[in-house]
Image (spheres, rainbow, N blue to C red):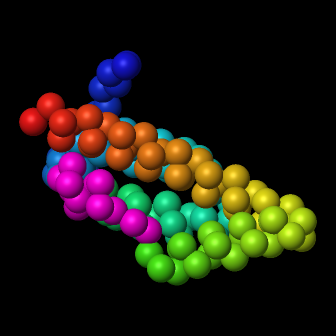
Amino acid sequence: MVQITLQVTEQLAQQLEPMSDWLSTILELSLIRFKTPAVQTASEIMDFLASNPTSDDLLNFHVSDRAQERLQRLLAINQAGMASAEEQAELDEISQIEHVIIMLKAQALESSKRN
């Protein structure tokens, strides 16, 4: 892992402090450069991580019903072979989000086993 040092204002440092454990993940999600409605799902996750969740909170986390319903709809459209380029791009972005969440949950599970 690489450590990066940033200079930020005191005000921003105070805002970042509660989410320091999750800052790298929030940055990773931000860098995906969402171009579809998947950004709403990413925002939900970033808001959740900004609340400084415990490992148990993370293991129990699920995106909103709205996000789950959208994913189910996209998967059905894709399975029927009717997904537009935009819908396929959204599925790809959701896949990236899901990968990040799976990795976080795996880390949280490993951490909870050690404690």
The residue depicted at 30 percent of the width and 26 percent of the height is 5
Q: Position of residue 51 (x, y in %)?
A: 23, 61
Q: Spot the residue most to the left.
A: 115
Query: Which residue appears at 20% of the width and 54% of the height?
Result: 56
Give the magenta range. Answer: 50-63
- Report if residue 56 lies within the magenta region: yes
The answer to whether residue 27 is visible is no
Q: Is residue 97 visible?
A: yes
Question: Is 39 or 15 nearer to us in this picture?
Answer: 39
Front residue (pair 21, 56): 56
Q: Quadrant of residue 3?
A: top left
Residue 24 coordinates in the image, percent (x, y): 37, 39
Tell me: 50 left or right of 101: left
Left or right of 76, for residue 28: left
Which residue in the rendered view is the most extreme toward the top?
2
Q: Is residue 95 magenta?
A: no
Locate the N terminus by quadrant: top left
Residue located 53% across and 73% down the image:
67
**Residue 68 quadrant:** bottom right
Which of the two residues, 78 or 26, is positioned nearer the viewer here? 78
Q: From the viewer's perspective, is residue 19 above or below residue 113?
A: below
Q: Residue furthest front?
A: 113
Q: Position of residue 44 (x, y in %)?
A: 42, 67
Residue 75 position within the rendered picture, expressed as x and y whole percent measured from the top left: 72, 67
- Taking the image as shown, residue 64 lies to the left or right of residue 109, namely right
